[in-house]
Image (tube, rainbow, N blue to C red):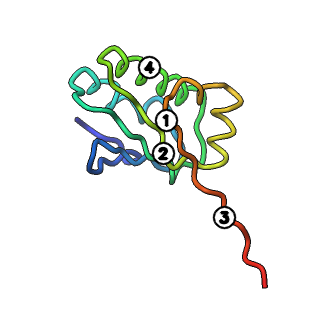
């Protein structure tokens, strides 16, 4: 599978996404989904934004995995991406969305 510079594989079928997510960056995973044999984890901890085509790509990816009774989990979702997922209600489609914990400022 050819991966874009914004998508890197990691153990346990986890892929790290970077910077800005759009459909073009998810296409390799969508194409490879027909060969999927285990759940997919998408790490969003380094993602600053996602556009409408990225949302469509996530939905298409989710549909492909569900056809095979597999899950797609979003982990490390940044606050800005989480807000967008909630506004569009796409977060409700995924069974597992784990956001980055908000860091409390240090006080003296």
**Badge 1 vs badge 3, beta-carbon distance below 8 Å:** no
User: What is the residue that sits farthest to the bottom in this orientation?
Assistant: 108
- The residue carrying mark 2 is 75
The answer to which image quadrant residue 69 occupies is top left
Q: Secondary structure at mark 4?
A: helix
The answer to which image quadrant residue 93 occupies is top right
- Dot 4, crowdedness within 10 Å: few (<14), some or many (≥20)? some
Q: CA distance from mark 1 to mark 3?
A: 21 Å
- Dot 1, crowdedness within 10 Å: few (<14), some or many (≥20)? some
Q: Is residue 43 left or right of residue 100?
A: left
- The residue carrying mark 4 is 60
Lower sequence index among marks 2 and 1: 2
Residue plotted at (42% across, 36% down): 25
- The residue carrying mark 3 is 103
Lower sequence index among marks 4 and 1: 4
- Dot 2, crowdedness within 10 Å: few (<14), some or many (≥20)? some
**Badge 4 vs badge 2, beta-carbon distance below 8 Å:** no
Q: Secondary structure at mark 2?
A: strand
- The residue carrying mark 1 is 96
């Amino acid at each position: 599978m050819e991966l874009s510079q914004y998508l890197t594989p990691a153990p346990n079928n986890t892929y790290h996404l970077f910077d800005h997510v759009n459909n073009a960056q998810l296409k390799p995973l969508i194409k490879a989904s027909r060969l999927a044999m285990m759940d997919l984890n998408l790490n969003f901890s380094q993602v600053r934004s996602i556009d409408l085509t990225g949302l469509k790509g996530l939905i298409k990816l989710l549909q492909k995995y569900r056809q095979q009774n597999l899950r797609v989990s979003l982990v490390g979702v940044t606050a800005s991406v989480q807000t967008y997922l909630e506004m569009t209600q796409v977060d409700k489609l995924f069974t597992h969305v784990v956001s980055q914990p908000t860091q409390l400022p240090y006080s003296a």
